[in-house]
Image (tube, helix red, strand yellow):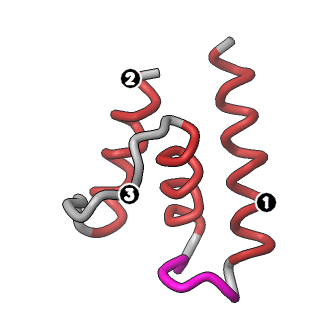
């Protein structure tokens, strides 16, 4: 189940990054695409309070995945 979840997240992240990287405001790299995907899949939303930078987004991603 864990491998299926990770595979799904990586495939969807690749899709988001490939098709929306140039057109989406605020999508500056792969980590942003991964953050968007995980926040959407886990239904935690995007909130006004976020951890800054790539390290903050990676921390949020790990926390959301562990919470599943």
Alpha-carbon span between mark 2 and mark 3:
16 Å
Please name the predominant secondary structure of the magenta segment in the image: loop
Q: Quadrant of the N terminus?
A: top right
Q: Residues within 10 Å of mark 1 (few under 14, many from 20)?
A: some
Regarding mark 1 in the picture, which secondary structure is present there? helix
Q: Residues within 10 Å of mark 3 (few under 14, many from 20)?
A: few
Label 2 sits on residue: 67
Place of residue 36 in the rendered image (x, y in percent of width and height, measured from the top left)? 53, 57
| Magenta-colored span | 23-28
Residue 57, placed above or below residue 5:
below
Q: Residue furthest top?
A: 1
Place of residue 63 in the rendered image (x, y in percent of width and height, measured from the top left)? 34, 34
Identify the residue at horizontal 29%, vertical 69% (top origin): 53
Using the image, tell me which numbered label, if any, was put on residue 51.
Answer: none
First along the sequence among labels 3 and 1: 1
Q: Is residue 16 left or right of residue 66?
A: right
Q: Quadrant of residue 67?
A: top left
Q: Residues within 10 Å of mark 2 (few under 14, many from 20)?
A: few
Identify the residue at horizontal 53%, vertical 44% (top origin): 38
Regarding mark 3 in the picture, which secondary structure is present there? loop
First along the sequence among labels 1 and 2: 1
In contact (CB < 8 Å): disc 3 and disc 1: no
In front of the other: 59 or 24: 24
Alpha-carbon span between mark 1 and mark 2:
24 Å
Place of residue 60 in the rendered image (x, y in percent of width and height, measured from the top left)? 33, 45
Label 3 sits on residue: 46
Place of residue 52 in the rendered image (x, y in percent of width and height, measured from the top left)? 23, 67
Q: Quadrant of residue 66?
A: top left
Task: Tell which tag, 3 or 1, sits nearer the viewer.
Answer: 3
In contact (CB < 8 Å): disc 1 and disc 2: no
Label 1 sits on residue: 15
Residue 11, placed above or below residue 2:
below
């Amino acid at each position: 189940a864990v491998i299926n979840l990770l595979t799904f997240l990586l495939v969807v992240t690749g899709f988001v990054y490939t098709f929306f990287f140039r057109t989406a405001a605020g999508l500056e790299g792969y980590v942003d695409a991964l953050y968007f995907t995980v926040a959407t899949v886990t239904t935690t939303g995007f909130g006004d309070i976020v951890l800054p930078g790539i390290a903050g987004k990676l921390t949020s991603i790990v926390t959301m995945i562990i919470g599943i």
